[in-house]
Amino acid sequence: MLSSMGAQISGQWSEPIDSLEKMKGKILRASGVGAMIYEELGLETVVLPGGELYTVMERGVIDMVEFGNSPH
């Protein structure tokens, strides 16, 4: 698959994360293969529509947002 998009960051956290240990138990919005990898690292993943991401982060429902504009 060819794409004109460059690499994307892994997400935006509600607090600084400087180790894998600090990630364990956090809740994040992720899907697909990325979600499977995060779950292996000890995180809980949820799938939410893009229009809700700001609100759920602001309310503390999730700890991290991963959202890309790629077509997969």
Image: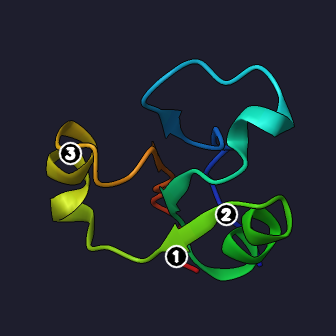
Residue lying at 54% horizontally and 67% vertically, measured from the top left: 30
Q: How many marks?
A: 3
Q: Position of residue 72 (x, y in %)?
A: 58, 80
Under mark 1, the amino acid is Pro
Q: Label 3 is placed on what type of residue?
A: Tyr
Which is more foreground, mark 3 or mark 1? 3
Say if mark 2 contacts mark 3, CB within 8 Å.
no
Point out the frontmost of discs 2 and 1. 1
Q: Which residue in the structure is indicated by mark 1?
A: 71
Q: Amino acid at mark 2?
A: Ser
Structural crowding at the residue carrying mark 3, measured as other residues with C-alpha within 10 Å and reported as few (<14), some (14–19) or many (≥20)? few
Tell me if 70 is positioned left or right of 20 in this view.
left
Residue 37 lies, in percent from the top left, at: 81, 68
Check the image and report above or below for 56 versus 37.
above
**x then y, percent, for residue 49:** 26, 73
Q: Residue at x 61, y 50 (%)?
A: 5
Give the label on residue 3, or none. 2
